[in-house]
């Protein structure tokens, strides 16, 4: 549910294709906003909408469906979407990326609210997850503990926001500078 991560997705896919096969990619969830049933404050809505506009200026071709703001009651709550990614990962690691993509597409293109359980279940079914297992995992303490563990791990990394890339090499952490338009700039930092 990070709009800058959505903007980074096209370049990230180019980076993934170019990475040497000996580099293992591990995704960690940053959490961003805890569970909340309260409507997003108007000033936060305005901030996020302005951020979408800024992203479209910085990263040409990135789309946002602004109908989201009139069709939904937005909440500042990203933990449900994070738990959905972990729940998908538990069924098979291939579903982790599919769930992330599904959440991003639902939110940014289809104007659906990924803070809502029904939206997450719909995405789970669309990508082929077992419905009952997904629903049980989504509400489980195991998944919640995994999310909190990942959030704490992320806090220890040399990053200053999202999206972030960190290379672990010989027990050393190296922050990789993100460029939203230039995949070769990122790849050169990784393979240097």
Image: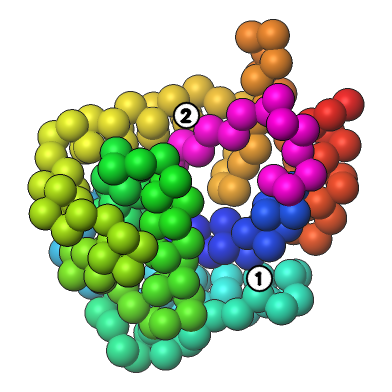
Residues in magenta, as a range: 16-33
Q: Which residue is mark 2?
A: 155
Along the line of sight, the residue nearer the viewer: 134 or 119 = 134
* Left or right, 60 with reference to 5: right
The question of residue 27 being in magenta is answered with yes
Q: Is residue 29 above or below residue 190?
A: below
Q: Is residue 80 above or below residue 147?
A: below
Badge 1 local density, few (<14 within 10 Å), some, or many (20+)? many
Q: Is residue 18 above or below residue 64?
A: above
Provide residue 4's location: percent of width, then percent of height: 59, 60
Residue appearing at x 29%, y 43% in the figure:
91
Q: Which residue is mark 1?
A: 55
Residue that sits furthest to the top in the current view: 170
* Label 2, label 1: how far apart the Cα atoms are: 25 Å
SS for tag 1?
A: helix
Whichever of callouts 2 and 1 sits on the residue coming sooner in the sequence is 1
Residue appearing at x 82%, y 40% in the figure:
187
Provide residue 179's location: percent of width, then percent of height: 78, 52
């Amino acid at each position: 549910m990070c709009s800058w991560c959505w903007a980074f997705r096209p370049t990230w896919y180019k980076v993934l294709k170019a990475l040497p096969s000996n580099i293992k990619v591990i995704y960690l969830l940053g959490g961003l906003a805890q569970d909340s049933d309260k409507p997003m404050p108007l000033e936060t809505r305005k901030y996020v909408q302005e951020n979408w506009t800024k992203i479209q200026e910085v990263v040409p071709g990135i789309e946002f469906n602004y109908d989201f703001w009139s069709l939904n009651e937005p909440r500042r709550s990203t933990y449900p979407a994070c738990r959905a990614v972990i729940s998908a990962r538990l069924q098979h690691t291939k579903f982790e990326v599919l769930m992330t993509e599904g959440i991003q597409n639902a939110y940014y293109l289809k104007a659906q609210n990924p803070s809502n359980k029904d939206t997450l279940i719909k995405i789970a079914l669309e990508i082929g997850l077992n419905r009952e297992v997904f629903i049980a995992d989504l509400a489980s303490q195991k998944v919640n503990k995994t999310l909190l563990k990942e959030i704490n791990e992320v806090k220890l990394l040399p990053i200053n926001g999202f999206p972030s890339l960190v290379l672990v090499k010989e027990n050393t952490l190296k922050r990789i500078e993100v460029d939203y338009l230039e995949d070769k700039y990122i790849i050169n930092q990784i393979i240097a």
